[in-house]
Image: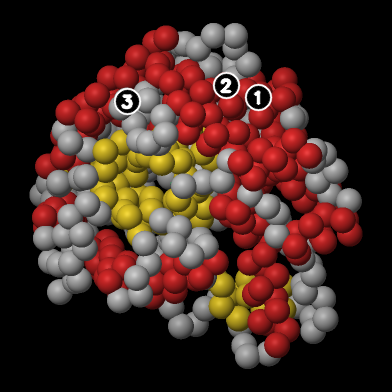
Amino acid sequence: MGLKLNDDFLWGGAIAAHQAEGAWNVGGKGVSIADILTAGAHEKPREITDGVIEGLNYPNHHGIYFYDTYKADLALMAEMGFKAFRTSIAWTRIFPNGDDAAPNEEGLQFYDDMFDEMNRLGIEPVITLNHFEMPYHLVTEYGGWSDRRLIDFFVKYAETVFTRYKDKVKYWMTHNEISNQANLTDETMGEFMIWTNSGLKFPEGTPAEEKLAAMVQAGHYELVASAKAVQIGHAINPDFVIGGMLNVAPLYPASSKPADMLAVQKARQARDWFSDVHVRGEYPAEFEAFAKRTGMRPDITEEDREALRAGTVDYLAISYYNSFVIKATSDDDAEFDNLHGYEIVPNPEVQVSDWGWAIDPQGLRYTLNELNDLYPGLPIMIVENGFGAYDEVVDGKVHDQYRIDYLKAHVAEVEKAVVMDGIPVIGYLSWGPIDIVSAGTGEMSKRYGYIYVDLDDMGEGSGERLRKDSFDWYKQVIASHGVDL
Ligand code: BG6
């Protein structure tokens, strides 16, 4: 039995435009940075190609055809009792190149229709402005977020959609998982992370310090853009609730050695400056010391600092999947630069998914408490959590007890955090309520859904939707306000 949550708790699910919509070149849409990512696999990174190359497999070009099927798919979400549904606006449907003088009416109309449909079904739209899908033209023409002009392009885009949907959407967030890029030296995923966050791609052999410097400056522009968007959004509709979005994961020390504990703290600080700026409007002291010491983030103006202070977020949107163990690589070298001093090591205490992601429900309660310690009283919405797994269809059924087990354990921890710890969590939107293309690997076979989609990694299949066992499970959880787990 779970603990009952309030009636206004936002139960639901979340996807992103580029992983679901397909229709990558339909309705005036421009090419996004997701449209040039090939299919990869576990430990086989997706390739970032120079433009779209004929003959290669680009899974985001078709997604799950949500562009055409969203009405039927949303009806299934409504059947589960969803109170809220998160998706993103594909920036390239609105401004195909990013620097266009005027928005694309067909793209605007598409989301008008989608948000109308959600509202008709009684499902609250929760909308991400920038979910790994900025216009590719902004990369080829401006060098992605390394260019200050991106701030204005983003703000114009935000203002356009805030104005258009001001009576249809209340909950927003700016950049998806903005701090992922802090892990830019990760061997398999680093290149993907800095690409999807900032549209930066480095020539082979670029020194790590150079990459870090580029990331830090780009991250600053993204934060300023976010803060300016928050201010404009509130001016357009004071009832807007606009968040910053981060992936969060507990970091555990590999041992009780003091150096391991310090390494954990430094590894955390290497990412937390993003949330600190979002929430407090100021860079934390250790980041300022780092910037001074290294000369990184040279372009910051007084006007930027004012914008950051004036554009703090209304809530934190978080994704939670796993936890990590940090080990100091020497006793005195735990520096704050994300490049030296520590490494990630396996955790013998937890199981992992088929993609090697640690399964750690208790870590979610820990994280929610930790966030509330850092930012007391700030509402938190869990906008991603879920279990990517292989599913098998047998006689038209998918018995995904493993997914139910994962979700049940995580929801139980959320409930404890809310009821027993008093953490202001306002919603739980599980990731990929309908199977979609994996962001990290481009696979369809890494499935998160309550709803099975008959498409394989090559995009072959009927596209038919099937209710998995987890569909009924989640329906009962929502109907009982979290009691019937
Ligand atoms: C988050 C992203 O990083 O994790 C999503 O915001 C992504 O876009 C999700 O899909 C799960 O990752 P993956 O690689 O399993 O799709």
Q: Measured from the top left, where is residue 48 in percent x and y?
A: 62, 35
Number of other residues with Cα within 10 Å of mark 1, as a class: few under 14, some 14 to 19, many 20 or more: some
Q: Residue at x 26, y 38 (%)?
A: 124
- What kind of residue is marked 1? Asp
Separation of residues labelled 2 and 3 (CA atoms): 19 Å
In this rendered view, identify the residue nearer to me: 390 or 92. Answer: 92
Residue 111 quadrant: top left
Q: Measured from the top left, where is residue 313 in percent x and y?
A: 51, 46
Check whether the beta carbons of the residues at disc 2 and disc 1 lie within 8 A of each other: yes
Which residue is label 2 attached to? 156
Which residue is label 3 attached to? 167
Residue 292 quadrant: bottom right
Q: Residue at x 39, y 72 (%)?
A: 365
Number of other residues with Cα within 10 Å of mark 2, as a class: few under 14, some 14 to 19, many 20 or more: many
Q: Is residue 434 above or below residue 403?
A: above
Please identify the quadrant where the C terminus is shown.
bottom left
Which residue is label 1 attached to? 152
Separation of residues labelled 3 and 1 (CA atoms): 24 Å
Q: Measured from the top left, where is residue 279 in percent x and y?
A: 56, 52
- What kind of residue is marked 3? Asp
